Amino acid sequence: MYSKMEGNFIVARFDKNTSFFDDLEEVCRKYNVKAGTVVWAIGMLKNFEVGYWNGQDYEKETFRERLEVVSLHGTIAENEPRYHIHASGARSNHMIVGGHLFSAIVDPLIEIQIMNVTGSKMTRVQDPSDKLYKLTIE
């Protein structure tokens, strides 16, 4: 992995056969990102596990083949669940799949930009009415 920070922005490259979330956590640790946003990412992922919230739970599906990342962005909170990432990827037939990203393996690379939010505290609190962990900003 390669990364560099300028101001509050970090640009990183994640390399082949690494866990997307392990790499994201490593970058956040390296630059002391307690709260922030994933502004964008491009590249390819495989073993792409995404979910659709049906109002009570996530309906998950895993796409084993490599997908070209079309969109990937989200928030980083100070507590668990730390990452709330949505992603979509194009299959070889140009059809798009996506949703809430649970896991993925980088193949061959991901380029990503993260914004470190330093002036606010961002945490998640579970709402008992729908079981969702909702972002709070102080």
Image (cartoon, rainbow, N blue to C red):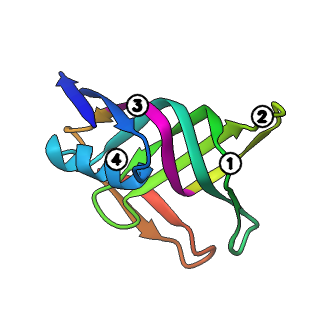
Q: Of tags 1 and 3, which is closer to the observer?
A: 1
User: Which quarter of the figure has residue 94?
Assistant: top right
The magenta region covers 102-114
Secondary structure under tag 1 reads loop
Q: Of tags 1 and 4, which is closer to the observer?
A: 1
| Placement of 102 over or under 40, stated as above or below | below
Residue type highlighted by circle 3: Ile
Point out the tag, 3 or 4, that comes first from the N-terminus: 4
Instruction: Confirm or deny contact between disc 3 and disc 4 (CB under 8 A).
Output: yes
Residue that carries the numbered disc 4 in the rendered image: 24
Which labelled disc corresponds to residue 112? 3
Depth check, front residue: 33 or 101:
101
Residue that carries the numbered disc 1 in the rendered image: 65
Residue type highlighted by circle 1: Glu
Q: How far apart are labels 2 and 4 at the CA level?
A: 26 Å
Q: Find out whether residue 120 is within the magenta segment.
A: no
Residue type highlighted by circle 2: Ser
Secondary structure under tag 3 reads strand
Residue type highlighted by circle 4: Leu
Q: How far apart are labels 1 and 2 at the CA level?
A: 9 Å
| Placement of 129 over or under 12, stated as above or below | below
Point out the tag, 2 or 4, that comes first from the N-terminus: 4
Residue that carries the numbered disc 2 in the rendered image: 92
Secondary structure under tag 2 reads loop
Point out the tag, 1 or 2, that comes first from the N-terminus: 1
Instruction: Confirm or deny contact between disc 2 and disc 4 (CB under 8 A).
Output: no
Point out the tag, 3 or 2, that comes first from the N-terminus: 2
Residue found at x 51% / y 38%: 73
Residue 12 in the image: state x and y as whole percent. 31, 30
